[in-house]
Amino acid sequence: MTQQEQIQYLANIYYLAGIDSNFEVEEDYILQEIAKGIGAGYLETRKALDLSVQKDFAIKLPIRYSEKFRCLEDMLFVAMSDAKLHAMEKQVIISYSKKLGINQEQLDQIRSETKQPTRKLKYFQHKQCNIVRLEIIFALLYNRFKFSNHRIRRQI
């Protein structure tokens, strides 16, 4: 993918993520992973976000056939990250699917297959939260030990 193609690809997904006026942290995390997956860096991500909020923005299909379907999967993944598909998100996805020539049965199959990564993401986020909690606990215990050890040395 060229840089411009990466920007348009990500802008499509940013547009979808922001269409419900409720941009979640999970959606941002997913978008970062999608950007990494297509080889886009900070500059492309920033330009994509700027492009997606323009008044005249329109979703455009990627050039390569495989990327068209990958974009649809990524759009579904982002849209379902909050466990519900909002009406505006649904409308955009259906419109995009029609451009690809996908019927409702095929879209339902793609959507059901997209739910699997969503479950994995929630499991990963749960595990990541637990790791952060453990790091905080260890840091607090270390500081308490260090502080109490310092007090003991002063008393000697």
Image (cartoon, rainbow, N blue to C red):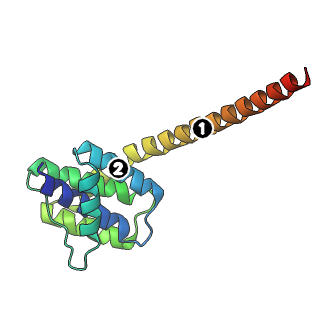
Using the rendered view, name the quadrant where residue 72 is placed.
bottom left
Of residues 69 and 12, the one nearer the viewer is: 12
Q: Residue at x 22, y 44 (%)?
A: 39
User: In whole angstroms, how far apart are the C-alphas of marks 2 and 1?
Assistant: 21 Å
Q: Residue at x 63, y 39 (%)?
A: 133
Q: Is residue 91 above or below residue 110?
A: below
Residue farthest toward the right in the current orientation of the protein: 155
Q: Is residue 134 left or right of residue 41?
A: right
Q: Which label belongs to residue 32?
A: 2
Using the rendered view, name the quadrant where residue 93 is placed.
bottom left
The three-letter amino acid code for the residue at tag 1 is Asn
Q: Residue at x 43, y 41 (%)?
A: 120
Q: Secondary structure at mark 1?
A: helix
Q: Secondary structure at mark 2?
A: helix
Specify the quadrant that holds the C terminus.
top right
Q: Is residue 50 left or right of residue 30?
A: left
The three-letter amino acid code for the residue at tag 2 is Gln
Residue farthest toward the bottom in the current orientation of the protein: 55
Q: Is residue 74 left or right of residue 141?
A: left
Residue 64 image point, x, y percent: 8, 51
Q: Is residue 112 visible?
A: no
Residue 137 image point, x, y percent: 69, 35
Mark 2 is surrounded, within 10 Å at the Cα level, by few (under 14), some (14 to 19) or many (20 or more) other residues, namely some
Q: Is residue 100 above or below residue 42?
A: below
Q: Which residue is mark 1?
A: 130
Mark 1 is surrounded, within 10 Å at the Cα level, by few (under 14), some (14 to 19) or many (20 or more) other residues, namely few
Residue 47 image point, x, y percent: 24, 62
